[in-house]
Amino acid sequence: MKPLIGVITSTELDDDIYYEGKDNVNAIMKAGGIPILLPYYDQEVDIKEIASRLDGLYATGGYDIDPTLFGEEPHPKLGTILPERDIFEIALINKMLEMDKPILGVCRGSQTLNIALGGDMYQDIYSQIEGELLQHQQKAPKYHGSHFVEVKKGSLLNRLTGETKLKVNSRHHQANRNVVEPLQICATASDGVIEAIESTKHRFALALQWHPENMYSKNDPIAESIFRGFIAACVKE
Ligand code: MN
């Protein structure tokens, strides 16, 4: 049986439509999962039921995250936030982790995984990190790998891809700052920006700062190994 993968949807400020990009949805389908698009719930009983029915969770990219969730006030460079999404997403991540069900996060999903476990993040890397940074908001096509990341040997990301250096796309102005146990940093850019984190305690909880779904849309083999590894972890034994 194909595993059911919850996909966190997006919305616009004061809009009444839930949506998700086709690259995200197609990546789950291509890798062998069935994507289930999730609207935002606010009751714990519902979130628990959703987690118990899903076989895996895919935390997609999207808007910025409410900094009060990690004890800060909004920086001037903070972008749009959707508080209902933040609360639902973090609660669902926590429930999935409690049940030790697989999670794959991309972009924003790497911040929500970290915050769910007590970590924090830069609201804007360019104004909050000293020194010159790489171009993390690439102007190349979205599927194009534009900067390198170094992958930690022996990590889940290393085992999935078989690589210690990857070329990844980049469309973010935020990034994780303090990564706390049981999470570890498993990929870093040459400017020190954290590009991937994973849990050392859970079966499969991996989150990437980049967008493998866009690379997978062009059949990138590394992106494929990440999505296939995620779906394989979600298949019930
Ligand atoms: Mn980047």
Image: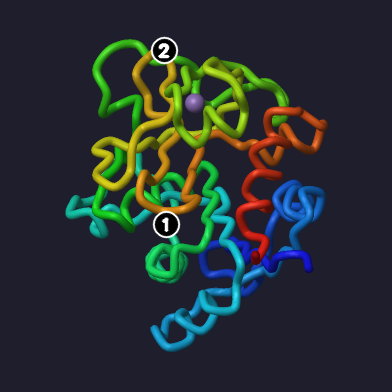
Which residue is at a point 28% across and 12% down the rendered structure image? 131
Q: Position of residue 203 (x, y in %)?
A: 47, 53
Q: Position of residue 67 (x, y in %)?
A: 28, 53
- In this view, the residue in front, 14 or 44, is 44
**On screen, residue 80 above or below 211:** below
- In this view, the residue in front, 160 or 145, is 160
Q: Judge left or right: residue 89 versus residue 7.
A: left
Q: Judge left or right: residue 133 versus residue 102.
A: left
Instruction: Tell me whether circle 1 and circle 2 mark residues in contact (CB < 8 Å).
Output: no
Kind of residue at badge 1:
Ile
Q: Judge left or right: residue 60 versus residue 26.
A: left
For the C terminus, the quadrant is: bottom right
**Color style of the picture:** rainbow
Residue 220 picture quarter: top right
In terms of secondary structure, where does tag 1 sit? loop
Kind of residue at badge 2:
Ser
In terms of secondary structure, where does tag 2 sit? loop
| Residue that mark 1 sits on | 81
Which residue is at a point 44% across and 45% down the rendered structure image? 110
| Residue that mark 2 sits on | 190
